């Protein structure tokens, strides 16, 4: 049999490449005859690390995804590997999500130089994060904390904490557990606490049980051209699709869509699937603006559309429906 060759597009960060390697390994495990080659694509978010990612002009245009999608449409690559939480809900015409891989942990972790978690942070401590969602939820837990906008890949953020220089006076930062584990850090979490070594510095981790994740957090999405051929890239990737993860993250992303927001809206959402009843349960928390009171909602239903709409009606003043090609 003649080998089939595909190009996989990825951002150049260590985490993006680790996720791409995970996809490549899984795909070749199912289709050993495939020949796969990675191609690094620089996105706007990578080229402009000081751009505020929560601004509508940046995130709604796909700060970390648009250039990968353009490369797909130009046939420069055959697959684009995304962290699903970074991917806008509306998929460009001509493209589709061919697979969503089984979800890793969706939780956020507090990373600090000292043990004890959130309660042990000093009075008026400073946390690094670029997420309005994380900022608003943590402000509700510790009103004395202040927050520093912190961008860059995971090692860069960890280095800023570990160095603790005067221009980065950080007491901690918040990162997704899935990203740390995919990069190979042994977090040794037990009873909500753990630690790991980074650049010869011991860093402590604590689970943030009150924190609902970003919609789709912990999931990896594989985007392809919307081709129906049995030899298309989409057809090969379909074998990796995880239906349970798909139903859960679709509910979360539809909630984001119904509220009319981009990927960095101050919205937390987590859907779970009851294997006995096959019903979805969706919880959401939403802050309409910085400092606004939290709006909370939850619902159980049969479909992602049903639970997303029910929770959106609890969280929002109005429901937005924009575009048709969504997931």
Image: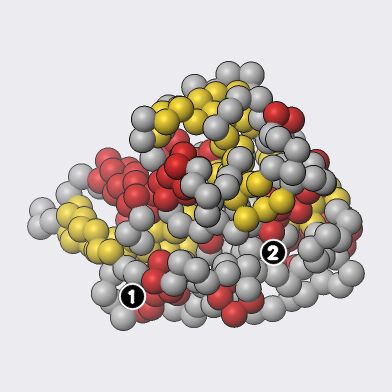
Residue 36 in which image quadrant:
bottom left
Q: Nearer the viewer, residue 323 or 185?
A: 185
* Residue drawn at x 55%, y 32% as measured from the top left: 113
* Residue drawn at x 39%, y 40% as measured from the top left: 183
* Residue drawn at x 80%, y 66% as measured from the top left: 289
Q: Nearer the viewer, residue 181 or 1?
A: 181
Q: Is residue 52 above or below residue 112?
A: below
Q: Crowding near pointer 2: few (<14 within 10 Å), some, many (20+)?
A: many
The local secondary structure at tag 1 comes to helix
Question: Where is residue 109 drawn, in percent x and y?
Answer: 60, 37
In the current view of this chain or complex, which residue is farthest to the top? 190
Q: Crowding near pointer 1: few (<14 within 10 Å), some, many (20+)?
A: some
Q: Is residue 234 above or below residue 177?
A: below
- Name the mark on residue 265: 2
Q: Check whether the beta carbons of the residues at disc 1 and disc 2 lie within 8 A of each other.
A: no
- Name the mark on residue 71: 1
* Residue drawn at x 42%, y 31% as measured from the top left: 201
Is any part of residue 326 visible from this angle?
Answer: no
Question: Where is residue 134 drawn, in percent x and y?
Answer: 68, 50
Q: Earlier in the sequence, mark 1 or mark 2?
A: 1
The local secondary structure at tag 2 comes to loop
Residue 66 in which image quadrant:
bottom left
């Amino acid at each position: 049999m003649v080998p089939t060759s595909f190009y996989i597009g990825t951002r150049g960060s260590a985490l993006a490449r680790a996720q791409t390697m995970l996809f490549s390994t899984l795909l070749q495990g199912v289709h050993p005859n495939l020949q796969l080659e990675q191609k690094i694509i620089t996105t706007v978010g990578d080229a402009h690390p000081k751009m505020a990612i929560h601004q509508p002009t940046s995130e709604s245009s796909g700060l970390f995804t648009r250039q990968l999608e353009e490369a797909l449409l130009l046939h420069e690559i055959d697959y684009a590997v995304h962290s699903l939480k970074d991917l806008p809900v509306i998929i460009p015409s001509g493209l589709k999500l061919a697979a969503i891989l089984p979800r890793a942990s969706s939780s956020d972790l507090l990373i600090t130089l000292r043990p004890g978690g959130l309660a042990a942070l000093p009075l008026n401590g400073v946390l690094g994060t670029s997420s309005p969602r994380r900022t608003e939820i943590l402000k509700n837990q510790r009103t004395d904390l202040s927050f520093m906008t912190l961008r860059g890949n995971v090692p860069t953020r960890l280095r800023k904490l570990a160095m603790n220089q005067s221009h980065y006076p950080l007491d901690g930062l918040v990162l997704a557990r899935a990203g740390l584990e995919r990069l190979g850090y042994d977090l040794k979490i037990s009873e909500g606490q753990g630690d790991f070594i980074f650049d010869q510095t011991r860093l402590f981790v604590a689970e943030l049980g009150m924190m609902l994740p970003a919609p789709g957090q912990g999931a990896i999405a594989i985007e392809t051209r919307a081709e129906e051929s049995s030899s298309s890239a989409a057809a090969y990737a379909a074998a990796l699709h995880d239906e349970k993860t798909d139903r859960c993250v679709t509910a979360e992303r539809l909630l984001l869509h119904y509220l009319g927001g981009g990927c960095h809206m101050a919205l937390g959402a987590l859907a779970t699937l009851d294997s006995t009843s096959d019903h979805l349960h969706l919880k959401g928390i939403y802050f309409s603006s910085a400092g606004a009171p939290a709006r909370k909602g939850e619902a159980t239903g049969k479909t992602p559309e049903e639970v997303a709409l029910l929770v959106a009606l609890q969280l929002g003043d109005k429901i937005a429906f924009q575009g048709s090609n969504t997931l």
